[in-house]
Image (cartoon, grey):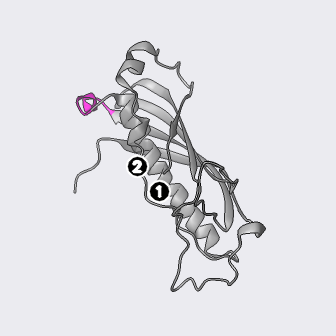
C-alpha cells in the first residue's frame, strides 16, 4: 500500500438533510438485515465547486472542493422508468485537497483535485447518509459507488478559461445516469 498522491487534508459538512418522502415510502418497512435500498433508476444530482485555497503551500497546491448531493424525487418527464427514493436528501460537504509538488506529471492539478476530491467527499456523504437512514423508518439506503471523471476540463475549455482567484469556486456538474 502506498499513499495516494492526492490527499484529502480536511472535510467539513455544511449541511446534512435527510427526510422521509411520504409520497415514496415503501408499503412495508424493509428488513435491514436482508434488504437495503439501492438507487437504480433514481435521479441523483451532484454539483462540484473547486477553487485554489493556497497555490503556494510548501507541500504543493491546496484546493477547496465542495460537493452537493441531492435527491429531490421530482418527476423528470424525459425519464420513462424513473424510480424514487424513500428519502429526500440534500448534503453539502467541503474539503481541502492537497496536490503535492511533482504530481502535475499525472495530470492537471485542478482536474486531479476535482475528480479525486469529489470522489473522496462522495464517500463521506455516502457513509453519512447510510448512518442516518439506518435509524429511520424506511430503512437504510446506500448511495451508489460513482466516479467523477466527467469533471475533467475539456481541452478547449482549459485553454480559454482563466484560473479562478484564490477562494473562488469554479462549478462543475457531474452527470448521473
Say which of marks 2 and 1 sits in front.
Answer: 2
Q: Residue at x 46, y 26 (%)?
A: 54
Q: Which residue, given by chain and number where applicable, does mark 2 sit on? A: 147
Q: Which residue, given by chain and number where applicable, does mark 1 sit on? A: 123
Question: Is residue 109 depicted above or below 119 in this figure?
Answer: above
The stretch in magenta equals 100-106
Image location of residue 171, percent across then percent down: 55, 31
Number of dots carrying numbers: 2
Image location of residue 81, percent across then percent down: 58, 61
Which residue occupies the extreme right position in the image? 22
Dot 2 or dot 1, earlier in sequence = 1
Which of 74/8 is in front? 74
Tell me if 166 is positioned left or right of 16 in this view.
left
Question: Is residue 35 depicted above or below 123 in this figure?
Answer: below
Q: Residue at x 66, y 49 (%)?
A: 77
Tell me if 15 is positioned left or right of 165 in this view.
right
Dividing the picture into quadrants, the one containing residue 150 is: top left
Residue 119 in magenta? no
Amino acid at each position: 500500500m502506498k499513499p495516494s498522491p492526492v490527499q484529502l487534508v480536511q472535510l467539513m459538512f455544511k449541511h446534512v438533510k435527510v427526510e422521509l418522502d411520504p409520497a415514496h415510502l415503501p408499503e412495508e418497512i424493509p428488513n435491514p438485515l436482508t434488504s437495503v435500498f439501492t438507487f437504480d433508476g433514481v435521479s441523483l444530482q451532484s454539483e462540484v465547486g473547486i477553487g485554489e485555497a493556497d497555490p503556494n503551500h510548501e507541500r504543493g497546491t491546496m484546493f477547496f472542493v465542495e460537493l452537493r448531493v441531492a435527491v429531490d424525487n421530482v418527476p423528470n418527464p424525459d425519464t420513462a422508468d424513473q424510480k424514487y427514493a424513500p428519502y429526500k436528501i440534500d448534503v453539502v460537504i467541503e474539503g481541502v485537497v492537497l496536490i503535492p509538488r511533482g504530481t502535475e506529471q499525472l495530470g492537471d492539478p485542478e482536474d486531479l483535485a476535482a475528480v479525486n476530491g469529489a470522489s473522496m467527499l462522495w464517500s463521506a456523504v455516502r457513509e453519512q447518509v447510510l448512518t442516518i437512514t439506518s435509524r429511520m423508518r424506511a430503512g437504510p439506503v446506500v448511495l451508489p459507488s460513482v466516479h467523477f471523471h466527467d469533471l475533467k476540463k475539456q481541452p478547449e475549455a482549459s485553454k480559454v478559461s482563466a484560473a479562478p482567484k484564490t477562494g473562488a469556486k469554479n462549478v462543475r456538474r457531474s452527470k448521473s445516469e
